[in-house]
Amino acid sequence: MTTATESAASLSAPVTRGAHHIGLTVPDLQQTLGFFTETLGFQVVGEKPDYPAAFVSDGSIMITLWQAQDPGAAVAFDRKNVIGLHHVALAVEDAAALEALQARLEQAEGVVIEFAAEPLGAGPVRHMMCAIPGGIRMEFIAPTA
């Protein structure tokens, strides 16, 4: 009998091929949709008004936004004590794009900058973290050239 550990170790390659989409429940669908389309330049690729939900994409990843049924009764995320999504990390073109995005985020309604663009560890990669409208944590990363 093969154990799960032995079975996983025998795989020669991952069975998955990257992220297809990320689904986020948000307290205000229209505000968060506006953030993705107006601040980040995502395109709406679908909607489900009766759910309600909207689907946005930057051409690489799709993000599904679902309206919380009762946002007033929802519990805010506590990254140190709640199991689940800690943050979403999206790549930007380069350090200049990261700096330009940070300037836009500083002016965007409902965005709270957790930390400004800085080196990620001791390497040349730079990143920043913010909370988008509704409080979801989002990281933006500029890879090295």
Image: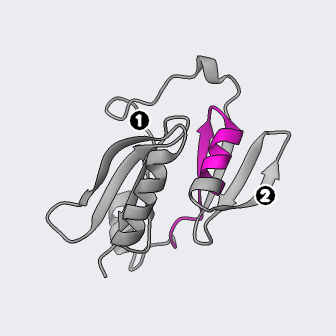
Residue 16 is situated, as x and y percent measured from the top left of the image, at: 51, 70
Quadrant holding the C terminus? bottom left
Q: Is residue 1 visible?
A: no
Residue 112 is situated, as x and y percent measured from the top left of the image, at: 42, 39
Q: Nearer the viewer, residue 69 or 117?
A: 117
Q: Is residue 55 left or right of residue 118?
A: right
Disc 1, SS:
loop
Q: Nearer the viewer, mark 1 or mark 2?
A: 2
Residue 78 is situated, as x and y percent measured from the top left of the image, at: 39, 29
> What residue sits 41% from the left and 55% below the top?
102
* Numbered badge on residue 52: none
Residue 50 in magenta stretch: no
Q: Is residue 57 above or below residue 94?
A: above
Q: Given the current orientation, which residue lies at the most extreme left position?
A: 122
Q: Is residue 125 left or right of residue 133?
A: left
Which residue type does callout 1 highlight? Ile
- Residue, disc 1: 83
> Which badge, 1 or 2, is on the more N-terminal residue?
2
Disc 2, SS:
strand
Quadrant holding the N terminus? bottom left
Q: What residue range appears in magenta?
A: 17-37
Q: Is residue 71 visible?
A: yes
Q: Is residue 124 left or right of residue 44?
A: left
- Residue, disc 2: 46
> What residue sits 36% from the left and 49% below the top?
129
Residue 30 in magenta stretch: yes
Which residue type does callout 2 highlight? Gly
How crowded is the residue under tag 2: few (<14 C-alpha within 10 Å), some, or many (20+)?
few
Q: Is residue 86 left or right of residue 31?
A: left
